[in-house]
Amino acid sequence: MDALAEWNEKLTQCRMDLQLKEKRERRLKELEAEVKRQRRAVADGEAELDRERDDVRQLRKTSLSRLWFRMVGQLDERLNKEEREAAEAELKLETARAALGALEASAAEAREALREVDGAGREFDRILEEKKAWIHLFDEPTSRLLEQLADESADRKARLREIDEAVSAGERARTRLDSVREKLGSAKNWGTYDMLGGGMISTAIKHNRIDEARSMMHEAQHSLRLFEKELRDLSWTSGAGDADIGGFLTFADYFFDGFLTDWIVQGRINEALEKTDSGRIELGRQLSRLESERRKTISERDGLDARYRETIERR
């Protein structure tokens, strides 16, 4: 048997072992979840038995409960009832403990079975590496194809990093805008109260909220600029030109130029709220677009990686 045939035979066995490993991992996960649930059932049973035994003890010793049931002539009946319930709770607990023991034994067996195929993935990767080295030495066309696939996959991975950085920047900007919205909303409410005769205290609180909103706006301004930068960094590889992000950047510029210096100074809180809400909506739209781009890029990366592995396997 030549080297390629031997590698292919081993890869076939590894694929079978990997499928078996996935099946055993799923079974172990299910058993561990059942063990966890059964442990809770045992703990509940122990608590129930303690309560029932305590009820029996209360009726057997001198207590208000014993005195009351003796006075109404129901002591023996009540004691029998509590003893019966305690016995039932004990039987229920024994059953739960037995079930837990059986589940733990099954989980231990599943772990042992999983260990038998635990190295399947490492063996698969090792054989692929050996076969890939042979291809690079003796099969130039396939070697060039592998290099092309690897380069394209690396491009997708680099783009994913850029997208993730943009999403993180966008989420930070959204958090800042949410804070601005909260402070402006509070300022609006206190302003309404002030107009209804709230007095000096409501006026002071309103202006304090406006000051807080202004501070939050500075933070939002910084976060939006960072998000703008991340979007521009993406545009050179995205295939979607500047027109795609133009709507957001137009908002960002307007936000920067007017928000801090005009609206709050003039006390136009309602307009500030409207613009903040518009910004939050536009920011959400951009984040949704990024998430769609992220899913698409992940799909492309995974497809390229799968084709890379299949090219080696099928050679």
Image (spheres, rainbow, N blue to C red):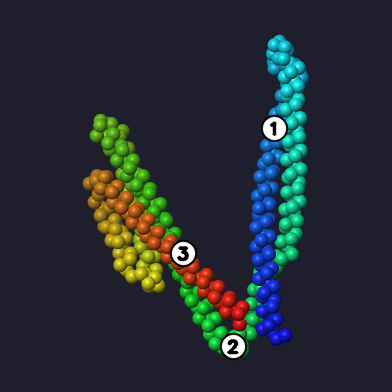
**Badge 3 is on which residue?**
295
The quarter of the displayed image where residue 227 is located: bottom left
Amino acid residing under circle 1 = Glu
Marks 3/2 in contact by CB < 8 Å: the verdict is no
Cα–Cα span, label 2 and label 1: 72 Å
**Residue at coordinates 70% horizontally, 11% vertically from top-left?**
72
Q: Secondary structure at mark 2?
A: loop
At label 2, counting other C-alpha atoms closer than 10 Å, the crowd grade (few under 14, some 14-19, many 20 or more) is few
- Residue 139 - label: 2
x, y percent for residue 252: 31, 59
**Badge 1 is on which residue?**
48
- First in residue order: circle 3 vs circle 2: 2
- First in residue order: circle 1 vs circle 3: 1
For the N terminus, give its image quadrant: bottom right
Amino acid residing under circle 3 = Arg
For the C terminus, give its image quadrant: bottom right
